[in-house]
Amino acid sequence: MPKRFEITRRDLLRTAAGAVFLAPLLRLREVNAQSVVPKRLVLMFSPDSHTPEWWPSGSGASFQLQEPLADFKGLEKQLLFLRRLDHAWTFDNHHEAGMAQLFTGARFFDEATHQANGPSIDQILLKETGIRAGTPIASVHLCAADRGLADKRHIISYSGPGQPMVHTPDPAKAFSQIFSGVTFGATPAPPPDPAMPDPVAEAKRQIERRIQQVNTAELKSIQRFLGQAEREKLERHVEALFELEQRITDMPAGGGGGSGAPAAASCEKTSTTGFSNSLNNATSITRWAQIQADILVSAFACDRTRVADYSFSFSGGHHEGLLGFSQSWHDIVAHVSKTDDSVTVDGTAMSTRQAFVKFDRFWAGHMAYLAKRLASIQEGNGSMLDNTIMIWGVESGTNHNHSPRDMQYLVIGGKNLGVNVGNYINNTAAQSANKLLTSVMNAFGHPATGIGIEPTCGPLSGFSV
């Protein structure tokens, strides 16, 4: 028996037999899509790097969260820490270079804009895989504590060279754009009428008809017009038809959902009340972030999209007055957090290092809120978070050192996509952050070998189970 391999749509269409035999395979793909749990991706950003305490203590599966990530308590088995990841290049203080390559691995598009010279992983996956799966919106881009500018320091998602995906800061506007035409609280659709066509039954009939058309004489006739490689593909495709017949026969009727179908999350309307666009009031920002996260969860639950980016502030954000600190968090705290300089935050004297931990936890708490919302929703054989990869990055290395070294990425969720969650992998040797981006793409089925300026860097060891 010839060695089996996967036949792609593109390969089959190149053969003379493609038009004859491809239809049932594509129909099966549509039927399977009804019973497959969605896969989702969320890119995330927060400003000014993290303190060394952001990294957990311990190692492997025995790590313990420290103060900056205290709000992630209870989600330890959903976290993957990968230390000693370096960016591939730098420029000046890395504020702009770090943002450009954060999720693209690319250099600057030009010297005027310093935007990225290539697409980010979310947009690559939308182009190269079926992650969108027919959802009405390709991707959503939300932010809080920011104005949603297209400037180089505000963007983490790119559709192509110098093509920024701009955030929507206003929750009401975002809600209107995402849920246009959606009826919330509508009565669920009744079961299919037995008299109506059943997609599984119809797929079975199509497979049977195609198999009945196949005989040795026809194959020999077709093969005369094919090269050796195409003949082998045709032979394997015919063999696959018989296997598909058995797979479809084993599927339940009534839409293909079966026991493996996802437990539908409730498609509920999100309240946008209480929004204020203050950039320095912690209470206002917290409510702002909560609304945006709730909109994102609803967008997933209503299957409006499966790809998003969720961003806070911008690279080098100052936020004077936030958390009771009257000066610039970036200049006075983040830049001197290694020292024991004394500052006063909300009337309490503390070191700049302690203040940076406080600042760090503030942003982390908003990330944790979204992660916990997703973890609370049952879906398929796990939670929505199990089927979603959240990847959180910053623009500079540990302790805001203006360096491309020891970048702090955290992968949250994705257990059902093969992510090695529940681990802290402290690499002994530095690895390229582009390997992490490659691994994320691979987890969604895109056979990328690299990204950006490192097209052959390969995936990152330890990312996958």
Image: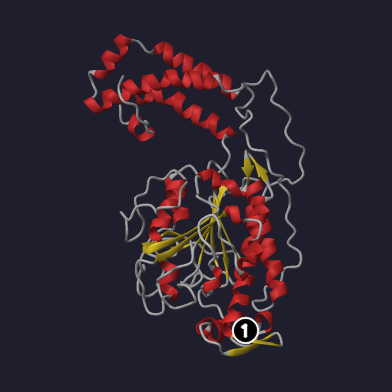
Q: Which amino acid does label 1 sit on?
A: Glu
Name the residue at 53% across, 41% down: 133
Percent position of residue 302, x then y: 66, 46
Nearer the observer, 378 or 194: 378
Q: On the picture, is 32 further left or further right than 102? A: right
Q: Dot 1: within a 10 Å radius of its alpha carbon, few (fewer than 14), some, or many (20 or more) residues?
A: some
Name the residue at 50% across, 27% down: 28
Percent position of residue 317, x then y: 55, 78
Percent position of residue 296, x then y: 63, 55
Q: Which secondary structure, mark 1?
A: loop
| Residue 6 visible in the snapshot | yes
Which residue is the site of mark 1? 320
Name the residue at 45% across, 69% down: 99
| Residue 144 visible in the snapshot | no
- 257 versus 422 height, above or below: above
Q: On the picture, is 360 further left or further right than 49? A: right
Percent position of residue 146, x then y: 59, 72
Q: Quadrant of residue 35?
A: top right
Q: On the picture, is 129 further left or further right than 14? A: right
- 414 versus 370 height, above or below: above
Name the residue at 58% across, 79% down: 356
